[in-house]
Image (tube, grey):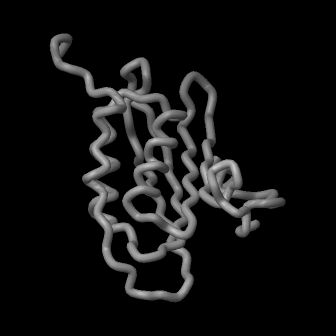
Amino acid sequence: MENEKKKLYPSIDKSILKGIPNPSKGAYEIKIKIPEFTFLGVNNQPDFASVFLTFYPKNKIIELKSLKLYSYHLRDIIVSYERLINLFYDHLMEVYEPERLRVVMVCNPRGGISSKLTIDSDWESRGGKEQFKDWIGKSEDIWDVVM
């Protein structure tokens, strides 16, 4: 096993993600939960997280089977969760080109510390217009419910 070549984050294959034509031109929201999101941390130890996607489609929606295969593909990749959430977000944005994408990753405790990471395409710092204010001023969010 020592001689086995380790897979690092550049080997993450976004081509696994497939889109389906959006059956509606009207606005709607899709919420997806990946409760068993696993990958190898930078110390080659397994990391576990729950991932929550909020997706406002334009022309394509996420084919859930391909999302499942993509997430399984990450199980053998050595990557920090800070880098992983950014790559995951970038891949979803490139493949699906949604009106809005919010990714929340709640990492299980390791060494007694938990983490929650969030990226939202609506944020001005991500090129958004900050038109969706649903995340502002909430005292209870996914973090509170999961933890």
Residue shown at 34% from the left, 58% from the top: 67
Expressed as whole percent of the image width and height from the top left, the position of residue 10 reads 33, 32
3 displayed left or right of 118? left
61 displayed left or right of 18? right
Expressed as whole percent of the image width and height from the top left, the position of residue 46 reads 39, 29
Q: Please tell me which residue lies in front, 41 or 147.
A: 41
**Where, by quadrant of the figure, is residue 75 drawn?**
top left
- Classify the position of the N terminus by image quarter: top left
**Where, by quadrant of the figure, is residue 73 drawn?**
top left
Residue shown at 53% from the left, 57% from the top: 52
Expressed as whole percent of the image width and height from the top left, the position of residue 100 reads 57, 66
Q: Please tell me which residue lies in front, 26 or 45.
A: 26
Residue shown at 57% from the left, 22% from the top: 111
22 displayed left or right of 11? right
> Residue 7, relative to residue 123: is it above or below?
above
> Residue 111, relative to residue 105: is it above or below?
above
> Residue 111, relative to residue 36: is it above or below?
above
